[in-house]
Amino acid sequence: MRVSTTQIFRNGIGAIQDNQQGLARTQLQLGTGKRILSPSDDPSGAVQALQFRSSVEKTEQYQRNGNIAEQRLRLSETILTSVGEGLQRVRELAVQGNNGSQTNETRRYIAGEIRQILDELVQLSNTRDANGEYIYAGLTSLTQPFSPGAGGEVFYNGDDGQRRLQISPVRQLAIGDSGQAVFMDIPTGNGTFVVRDDPANTGGGVIDAGSVTDFTAWVPDDYSIIFSEVGGELVYQVEDSGGDIVLGPEPFREGEAIRFNGIETRIQGTPADGDSFTLSPSENQDLFATYRQLAEALEAPVTDTPSRARLNNAVNRALVNLDQALGNILDTRASVGARLKTVENQRNINEDVLLQLRTTLSEIEDLDYAEAISRFNLQQTALQAAQQSYVQVQRLSLFNFI
């Protein structure tokens, strides 16, 4: 078979190019540290690497979500701590203002401090995070959740939803609490019923918050304790909302328990003929209203026994409402703390998962440097040999011998 000069040259150049291509690929592998530079290098490995790389990216996103959740929850914890401190201070002021040694003027000063704490509470409840979103607005995070009204009341403009973030493939975490749950939906009284004095009372009776002695016997209704004088003796009877007598008439003894339908309460001081007190099922009241009502009670002048009794009853009612609010704040803080612990635990789990995924991905696509360097040296030698052979072949021409 005759071999032409053109074919010899072409084969020589092809060998050089093949060796250059292999050498360049090995150099690129050494530069990137990756064994698989294109799917054709290892189709099966390339698919596996793509799947593991996707899992790594998802897990890294879960970690970023966990960081966002932690920032929001820690901010919420700080705000709730400040709200709790304000509650404690208002409670101290309520007890101080209820002291008989206080004057109308000093009680107004106390009420003024309570109103300042109320203003601070509004500001705290409208706190924004680093992204400018309100943390207590529920799902409407760009809407200011709390706004004061003309009459001093505070309105909630958000919703009762909770924003959630995915921190693992199977776990979502609430990263906030709605202002409705934290500041608005707070039970009044002892949580089962609330007591109130009639503003028209003319005596000195002061009723306590009451308690439930038998939940199975409790019948929710609006009850009235009505006082009257019979034969020169002060007696009372308890009526339900329909006017039916539930208890009595019974002689009144100061501080003696008044028991009926699984509940009890006590009255200190001496009510007057015609005075009355109501016991109604607890309803929800916002913390802002509790502060405002307490301030208004302390600002009202005390000039006689009936006005003193009204102050005492109002402060007692505020104290139990404050205790309910404080319990709600503490429960929310406990929930926030539990969620922070969940974020921390999940972060550790995600770190372990990332380590495993990255290790497996490295085994699939990372380069064996020892093998690659040996191959590089071999390819370099082969290229040099091909180049030298081509030079020798170039000289095999008759023109060189003419």
Image (spheres, rainbow, N blue to C red):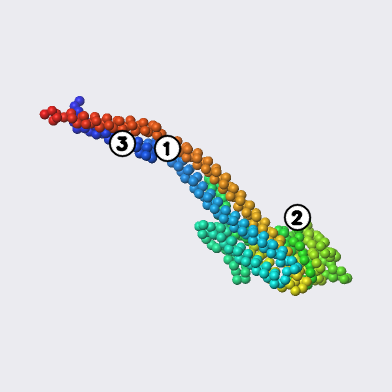
The percent coordinates of residue 118 (x first, y second) are 63, 65
Q: Amino acid at mark 1?
A: Glu
Spatial CA distance of label 2 from label 1 is 68 Å
Mark 3 neighbour class, 10 Å CA radius: few under 14, some 14 to 19, many 20 or more: some
* First reached walking from the N terminus: tag 3 or tag 1: 3
Residue at image mark 1: 365
Residue at image position (77%, 64%) is: 207
Q: Amino acid at mark 2?
A: Phe
Spatial CA distance of label 2 from label 3 is 87 Å
Residue at image mark 3: 21
* First reached walking from the N terminus: tag 2 or tag 1: 2
Residue at image position (78%, 59%) is: 264
> Helix, strand or loop at disc 3?
helix
> Helix, strand or loop at disc 1?
helix
Q: Residue 81 appears in which quarter of the rendering?
A: bottom right
Residue at image mark 2: 215
**240 or 355, which lies in front?**
355
